[in-house]
Structure formats: C-alpha cells, structure tokens
Amino acid sequence: MTRPRRPVTVETIVRDGDAASGRVRISGIDEPVEVERIDADTYRVSLAARRFEVVVARALDVEWGWVDGRAFRWTRAAEVAGGEREPAGGTSAIRAPMPAIVTAVAVAPGQAVAQGDTLVVLEAMKMELPLKAPRHGRVTAVRCAAGDRVNPAAPLIELDDGETPQD
Amino acid sequence: MTRPRRPVTVETIVRDGDAASGRVRISGIDEPVEVERIDADTYRVSLAARRFEVVVARALDVEWGWVDGRAFRWTRAAEVAGGEREPAGGTSAIRAPMPAIVTAVAVAPGQAVAQGDTLVVLEAMKMELPLKAPRHGRVTAVRCAAGDRVNPAAPLIELDDGETPQD
Amino acid sequence: MAAPIRRLLVANRGEIALRIIRACRELGIESVAVCSTADVRAPHVRAADRAVTIGPPHPRDSYLNAGAIIDAARGTGAGAIHPGYGFLSEDPDMAAACAGAGLVWVGPPADVIARLGSKIEARRLMRGAGVPIVPGETPADQTGVGLAAAAERVGYPLLLKASAGGGGRGMRTVRAPGRLRQAISEARREAESAFGNGTLYVERQLIRPRHVEVQIMADDTGRVVHLHERDCSIQRRHQKVVEESPAPGLTPAVRARLTAAAVSAARAAGYRNAGTVEFLVEGAGDAADIAFLEMNTRLQVEHPVTELVTGRDLVHAQLAVAGGGALPWSQDEIAVRGHAIECRVYAERPAEGFLPDAGTLLRYREPAGPGIRVDAGVVEGGVVSPAYDALLAKLVVHGETRGRALARARAALARYVVLGVRTNLGLLSRILGHPRVAAGPVDTGFLETTLDDLLAEGGEDPALALAAALAVDARLSPRAPEAGPSAPDAVRDPWSTLGGWRLA
Amino acid sequence: MAAPIRRLLVANRGEIALRIIRACRELGIESVAVCSTADVRAPHVRAADRAVTIGPPHPRDSYLNAGAIIDAARGTGAGAIHPGYGFLSEDPDMAAACAGAGLVWVGPPADVIARLGSKIEARRLMRGAGVPIVPGETPADQTGVGLAAAAERVGYPLLLKASAGGGGRGMRTVRAPGRLRQAISEARREAESAFGNGTLYVERQLIRPRHVEVQIMADDTGRVVHLHERDCSIQRRHQKVVEESPAPGLTPAVRARLTAAAVSAARAAGYRNAGTVEFLVEGAGDAADIAFLEMNTRLQVEHPVTELVTGRDLVHAQLAVAGGGALPWSQDEIAVRGHAIECRVYAERPAEGFLPDAGTLLRYREPAGPGIRVDAGVVEGGVVSPAYDALLAKLVVHGETRGRALARARAALARYVVLGVRTNLGLLSRILGHPRVAAGPVDTGFLETTLDDLLAEGGEDPALALAAALAVDARLSPRAPEAGPSAPDAVRDPWSTLGGWRLA
C-alpha cells in the first residue's frame, strides 16, 4: 500500500448523490477517489489503493470525521470563505484556514482575478491546499510570502469587491 | 423492593409532553408511576419503589422496548383494535392481542356497550389486561368464557357497528 | 517448509471472520475478506484490509464456493486461507485444493480432516490409540443369540444401530434384556429397508452424559499440547448454547484421563494446528467413564472460554503454527486460572420453537467492563440476514470462581441491548440462573428437559413488561400536551394506548 | 466486627463509580449512587439501584460534600461507602466521619490515611520499617560547611529543599559541588521568605527514574499480600497516561525487593484494604536502586492492569475485606500471567497544551474482542462536562507478551470512535508506537521530552485527513445531483467545499 508522505492535491470531485468520485494527486501520481455511503453516519472512502471507513458527525457549528482512530474537526469559520459575510462593496481578506506554511503566492497587488483562481497555496498537515478567489475582483494587498508560517485566520490576500467598477 | 407476582392493572396515566405520571395497581396496592425521557431513545420508568431504564426503538410496523435485558415487541395489529379498519356497518371482532387466559367476560350477547367499556379481561404474562370496546355498539356474539386459554388474534367478542340504529 | 504468513484470506463471515481479521491486524498480517453480495457492507468486510465479493447470498454460491475462494486468494496475493468454523472448515477437498494451489491452509492436512471426519474411521483410529470410545460391537453372530450375548457384554441400556447407516434409521433404544428381541426385529427390518443391509451394531447408551471436550494444538514437528477442557453440556438439539471452562465437578483424575486421551488422539491422527477432541462423560467422581465422541478439525465457536482461562490466544497460535512456527507454549506453560463462561447470543425466537429471526439491528449495545469479552459479528444499524447462521455474538466472561463468572454473565446479559430482532438473551439469563446450573455440572439433557419451565419463567416479572409498555406508550404519544385536547387528565392505560399494537 | 456489606453508597462518578456499581450487582450488593445536579442522567446514576442528588455541579458542593454524602447513606440505609479515587478518597476526616456515623469505609482507617498522607510522617514510618527512601537529610549544622558535608553524603546531583515547605519554593537543583554555595544562599532566602524558616534539606535527585508501584491488599487481621507491580513511567506533569504490568526490564531481584518493601510498608502502616506503594527505580539490572515515593490509600485508576495479569478482582476483594472478610487469596495464589497495558482516554486537546475538552459525545463506540477491556464512564449522546475530570474511559488490553499487548492496544485504539469532543486517542497510539516504548522501559521524563515529536507526527499520513474531508464533504453536499445545477462534472475539491469550515 502506498503511504503518501508528500503533499496531496485534490483535483476533481464529481458528486452523485451520496456518492462521489474523482481524482487526487498523491506524490505526483493521479489516483482515483471514491466516496460511498455505508450507513447514516459512515462512509467508505477509497483513495488510491487504500480503503478508509469514515464516521461522520455534526454539531451546531462543527463537522467531525473519524478515520482509523484519528478524529478531524471542522468548525464553521465565516472569515475563511473569503469574506462572503462582510459587507459588499468593501475589501475582504482571504485568510488562512489553519496553521500552515505558504508554499506559493500566485498573485500580485493590482492583479485582477476571476472566481476560482488560485491566490495562494498553503501546506498544512503535509497536504497542499490552494486558496481560491471566492469571486471576481482585484488584489489590493498581498500580506504573505512563500515560506511564511501563518496562523489560523491570518489575512493572506486582500481583494476588493467584485461589484466595484474596475477603474 | 416489591417483586409483584400477581396481576397488575394500570389505572390512570396523565401525560405531560415526554413525561407521564399516574398510578398502577399492583397486588391490590396503588403505586405511583413516572415516565421520564432521558435521551432520544431512553426512558426512565419509576414503578412503585423500582426504577427501570427502557430503551425504545421503532421499525415500520414494530415498536420495541428493552428493559433489564428483556426485549418486548409490539406489532401493529389492526384486528386487535376491534376492527377499526373493517368496513363500517358490519360487525367486528375483538381479538386476543397475545396468548392469554380469559379471567372474566363482562358482557352478554345483545348487550349495548359504550366506547371504553370493558368487554373481557385477559391475563397474560401475569398481567391483567382489560379489552375495551373501541366504539359504541351492541354485542352480537361472545366467543369465549372465563378460564379459556386463547391464542393471538382469536375472536373473543363480536360487536355490531356503532352506527347501525339500535332497533 | 511453510513461511510466516504475510497476507491471509479469511474464508468466513460474522464474528469469527472479524476475530481472525483483528488477530491479523495485531500480528501485522494483511487480511483479505470474502463476502457474498448480501454482505458487501458487513462488518467483516469493513474490517479487512481488502475484500473480494465471491458470489450470490446463498452459501453454496459464495462461502461454500471453494473455487471462487481460491481464486480470490490468488487474485489478492494471499498466501494462506483461514476457514474459521462451519462452511468449508472441515472439507478435506478444500484443504487439498488449497495445498494444490500452493496456499497454506490454517488447519490440519486434508487427509487428517478426511480420516477424522469419518466416524467409523475415527472410532477405529481412537480404538487403536487406546482412547476410550463408547462401548459397542458388531457381533459376527447376527442371530438373536449372538446379539443378546453382545448386548450382555456392552451393557444396558443400549442402542441397536444399523451398521450400514445413520440418521436414526434402524436405531432402537433397549432399556432391558426383555425388550431386546422385539427391538432386533424392528431395527433389522428398518435397516434392511433403508440401507439394504440388516447388520446391527450394539452400542451402550450413556446415562445422562456430559459433553466435555479438550482443546489441543499441534505444530508441524508433531508436538502436541492440550489447553484443558470445556464443558458444553448445555445444548439444544445438539447445538451448544452455553460453554464453560474448566468443566465443573470433574475430579483431577478424570480431567487427567481426558486430556491424556485427547493428546493421544491427536498424536494418533497425525494432527496439526488447532483441534478439539469431544468426549461424553458418564458418572461422577474418579469412576466417571469417558468416551470419545468425535474430533473437530478446526477452531471451535467456544474457543474463547479456553483463551480466558489459559490466557493464550488460539488464533495467534494457529497463524504461527500454520506459518511453520513451533508451538508457542510448552505443556507446563498452559494453566487454567479462574472460570470462563460463554453465552451464544442468537437472533431467534425461543418461545416459538427457536425460529431464527432476521431484521435490522435498531439498537445494539454490548456490555463492557471487567471480565467481559464480546466477540460480535454485527453492529447497530446492520441487517441480520436469514441467509446465514443466527449467531449474533458471543458474550464471554471470566471470574475468579464459577459463581463469580455466573453472576458476572447474568449482570452483563442484563445490560446487553438488542432491539430489532428477537434474541435468546432472556433465555440465556434464565439458564444461568437455574438452580441446577448454579449447583454445578448438568448433563446434555438439561436444557431440553427444563426448557418449558425456563420459557414460562419469561413472564415472571410483569413490572418489566409494564415499564417497557409505559415507555413505548410515552414515545407513541404526542410530544406536547397541547397536541391533543384530551391529553391532560385523560384516563389512559398503556395497554389500551398500545391497543393498535400487539405485544409479540 | 464488620458484617458483609448489603447496600453500598458509591461516593464518586464516571468510570470508577460504574465499575464499583457493576461489582455490586455481581456480588448481590445493592448500590446507591450520588450525583450533582449536572449528573442526574449520568451513566453511574442510571446504573445504580438508587440515586441521591447531593448538590450543585461544583465538586465542593457535591462530590466533596462529606456531610451530604453521609446524609445520603443514612437516608438510603446504605451501610458502607466506597469512595473510588480522587474526591474524598484520601480524606482522613471523611473516613473518620463515616466511622462516626456507623458506616463502613471501604478503605483504610482514618489514622492510617492521615499518617500516610503526610509525606514527612510517611518517610519517617518507611525509614523505621527499613523501606528504602530517596537518600536525604536535614543536617543539624546548617552552615555552608555542614550542608556541603551532607551533600557529599547524599551525592550529586541533589535537590536543596526548604525543610518547612513544599510546592517547589526554596528548591534548587545542584548538579555539582561547585554550584552548591550559590544554591544554598538562593534556596535559604526563598525558604525564609516563603515559610519564615531557612532550614534546608538535602535530597538526592534521581537520574531518569522510573515510576514503579506495588499493589497491596490487607485484611482486618493484618494479613497483607501484594499483587505485583505496575510501571507508570509514561506521565505528563505527574499525570499518568499509560500504565502496564509487569514492569518491563526489571530483574527478579529488583522485583522481589520492591514487593517486599511494599509489604513491609503496609505492615508498618497498619494498613487495611487496597493500597499502592509508589517507588522510583533508578538504574538497571540487579543494582537498580529503589526508593519509596508515597503510598496511595485507595484504589488506583490503573488497577485494571493488575486485575488482567493476576486474574483477581480488586473491587470484589475490597468489598469482601471491608465487610470483615478475610483476604480471598494467599500470596502464592497471586501470579502474573502475560502483559497488560492501560491507556487513559481523556477529553483533551493534546496539541493545545492538553486543554480539557467538553461537549456532547456525538459518536462513541468502544473497541471490543479478545484481550480488550474498556472501563468507561460515558455513553454515546452523553455530555462531557467541564466541571469534572476529563477521563472518559480506560482502554485496558491483555496479551501473551508485552509486544502482543502493545500491538493489541494500538489496533484497539484505531477502532475507538469518539466524535464530539477531542481526545488523546491519536497521541496514545503514537506513544505506544514509539521505538523507545516498544523497546522496553522508559523513564518518567520520556513523555515530556518526546511530546513535540509525537504531536508533530500527528499529521504524518495526509490520506487520513483527506479521507475524512471527502466523507464530510459528501455529507455536507446536496444528497441528489439534481439539487444543484453545477453538481455533476463540477471541478471541486473537498477543501474548497469545506471552505466555510476550518479544520481545527
């Protein structure tokens, strides 16, 4: 069995009801991914040649996933999504979702970006995590550089509102 | 702790949301009953001086109750309810809900009965179980006698439809 | 020479497949599960490193499909197959097919399975090894006179059996010499008509025998050890329900005779891996008679009681020995400490002739804590299929004494929550609480003769049923009093509220 | 003379209360639980025959409220109180109050608790009994010369301590004679300012000591037995995390010295019921030094490892002895078989300074099977309150060898599902997998020095986090493809779908 120790990049995931399939880049090799619901709170995830059973649970603001004795926990973090909840017409910060190292900055101040463009790539838990533009807009500030160690919620990129005319 | 070995008759139960309280007659002595919800599928039942934890579960047509290592099971049994699902205007049979012994027959053929009147008293699992009229009507046949051993679904009393004029 | 097992295919399902897969995980062996199409989400499939679907639900198409299983082993690179118990575990053809495919069979060689699987062969083998067998003979003189002489030698009560057949045909119990003549003519007539051969065999009928078996283990060098005995006398129609170790009330002399006979039997058979030598024990004290019954050439359902009293792991040892390793213990390293009892938890309806039950496990919560081990094949939310054995789990307890083990087992049974299928949990508790069981050894007829009383006892405490009814009623009822205008102060009783429902 | 206990009040909560209540059920003793208002639906309350609410959530108002507990015992007719561990279990006033109220205290008498609770008294007692203690002295000559002479006698490295106090004030580590003078003046200044007394005590500092303790048990007649040792060296800030028995790598001679010292200590103290004598062990081989640390006058959290290797039930024995019974075993009936390891499962955040965590147990599924025992105080759906100790459960495993026990524990940890509160389950698995732990004994500094590495290791396998993210993502997503127009063929990744959520 492959035990990947190098960054993982998720490529495409296609969802079909409770199941999903797609590909993930592990150690530079494309591998298939399959997600299958087993019962109300259990999923089977096939990842490359490995099979995992994941038990999920949900609290008000927390999503939990258990796999192989390890529990992972996601909290609702509005600021992470790129300021979708901040007032329209201002600028919003793209923030670090977890403690991470910045491996690449893909944009420069003043640059126009489209929704889904990668702004910054982080590495955390030995996984590669691209932070993407939540909307069209213009980069007003870059607050990080490759190699930086960043804390959760640290602002990395500031983006002006996509609705503002680009004058 | 009292370990009742003689027939039990349930008297009144007053329900207050998920909780309930009332009285039960055990061995001729009135005892208080309390039912309290502990979590989604667990109830605490206080019965006389004893406390029971009951775990409940539900399938399509079955209700389950677990207590002290013993599982009890109730199935939806339309015929038991006194023919509520039989066509109106006919006669309907009051049937035995479980293997039981008939301890008393409270009505005679031709007798008019009101909804809730006790028709027959059964003893099963050492508990006394009054079978009551599901509606107003007239007894058209008595098919059991005190001392009879009856099987589940055996017709015990036949009742004409309450809607029929009593001519 | 066999090499240590690196990847093992487990040719079974349910609790025993899970138990073997977990042993693999502990030993760093990769596990491959096989399953029928009905079991693709079963716990054993979820627990294994890999899984192969080998056929439709019916066992003959999947778990009994030797070809598909061997293909699955080849396809996944497994070097060995553990058959568990049941299914193909005692099929010499399967063991031979494994060997032919270059796979290690976790069990004895095919010829040993075949020899011990034949009751006549096994009897002959045991007689040769000096192992006591149930007294009996097929007299050369088959006349009434010859049979009567044989009967005198064997002793009454006895069984007249058709030499050529089995299945109870041509069989008669004869309690006294005066009944022999009539029985001979009946048995001979039946034997001739059923098997075309009227030759009769005279066997002593044991009086209220106990079923006591000895666990043995042997390695490739022919070393054999025993792991002491188990008492499995609590049976219903030859199906064990409760097992324990040590066997209560055996004298050290009888115990020594049993274990010595078991080791002799294994040696005589050229035995390898784990096996069980079953005996009937008749009488009490040092004078008790022991008689070989049969040898099971596989892991037994009830192996955990032996593990609990000896502190040894039989599956670990099976895998070591199958991989060519030496027995991990010498005989003097295997001692019994305390007392262990196993209760087989079945999905069945004891009050309805033990009909198997099936359905979804709406609630399933095992007891846990000191001295409690549960080997289960199911999880909450899982489906109990009518296609397979109704064994849900085995509750096994250890206590310092037999009394403590009995009390611990009953306390654990009372905490075992199973809803969604009917089980024998209540019956198990009443069996363990029966005065004869508490007092010590019972014979193999115990359960059949007390069953009616035990089942009737089920309703002894009406408060339980009433408590359950009150809770179910509370849940069926509207959750808030304002939901129904008549709710407060209404005169109700749980039986009438449950009037549309029937206790069943 | 005490009479057998018929109704017992358990003055505790969580796993230990449940464990005691279950022992009562097995022994036919009625159990009375006490609880705070936060615990009215807690598992221990649900398990007991009766329960009394004794006060508000804060322990001082409930579980530490001796008066309320004694009133509860009187009110329910309980004749005895088991204090468990923690709370009032080592409070001599509580033991005295019980005796005053005519209640049996399941533990040693108040004066024994008091004597052993004072470290100075305990040291004096042990020295008198010939039990080795950490070398040290308070020289009569408190000048620099006198202290230097004492230091030479005790040996370097050493600790200078304020004779009058504790808590680390007035304490200095001195590694070599050249550092002594400076340390004396600093320690004296601090001691005078803190305790008004500059008298200094010179104690040898042990080098990488191991924490090894001996379980003892004594009855009313003064008979004492030991149940061998436990190694509890895997600690974090003096909190034990993993315990095992037997202690790895001890020579038989050292083991014999430890157990003999423990029995002497118990005899010298006039000990009754269960207790633990804690030692530090320094060095290896037969020359290893042992030194008395303290005696715990109650059942320990880690008692199950002793139960698994000896096959004895300590709570059963405690209740028997407290009821005036004789010790149930002689010394030669207590043998160690195999190896046992306990992992304490805490609701805490190891990566965030071990902050305790609280919340609802959304999923809680224990491992089960051969050699696995879980003593838990929680159930799925229950609430873990910040008001109490964060110990959720103890996973205890038994194996034929230490290696098998380690592998079994890791396999069990990997099957232990806890969601809703963060736990140390992952850390426990990494501790057990550490090469130094696998190799054998570690010292009490092991966990502190390797913690950073162990925590960093948490992210070693990104596939786990990815698998979890994919499953959570699948659940968060619309259940049917038609629910969102862009769902099929959309380019997505689980991190961006979880973009509104943060891994934390």
Image (spheres, coloured by chain):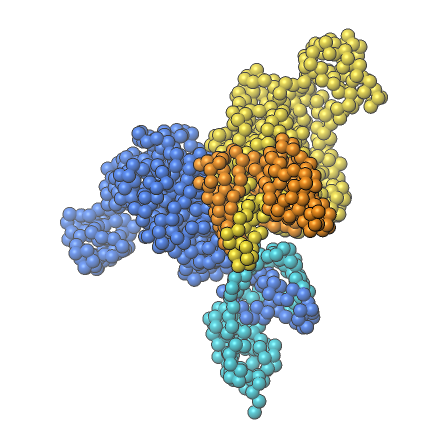
Chain colours: A cyan, B orange, C yellow, D blue
Q: Position of residue D180 (x, y in %)?
A: 22, 56
Q: Residue at x 74, y 38 (%)?
A: C94
Q: Tally the numbered discs.
A: 0
Q: Position of residue D87 (x, y in %)?
A: 34, 48
Q: Residue at x 60, y 34 (%)?
A: B103
Residue at the extreme front of the image, as rendered: B167
**Is residue A42 placed above or below D481 in the rendered structure?**
above
Q: Residue at x 54, y 74 (%)?
A: A81
Q: Position of residue D271 (x, y in %)?
A: 30, 36
Left or right of residue B21, residue D470 in this image: right
**Is residue D488 placed above or below C159 in the rendered structure?**
below
Residue at the extreme bottom of the image, as rendered: A167
Front residue (pair B157, A53): B157
Q: Quadrant of the N terminus of chain D?
A: top left
Q: Position of residue D76 (x, y in %)?
A: 37, 40
**Is residue A22 placed above or below C235 in the rendered structure?**
below
Q: Residue at x 52, y 62 (%)?
A: A59
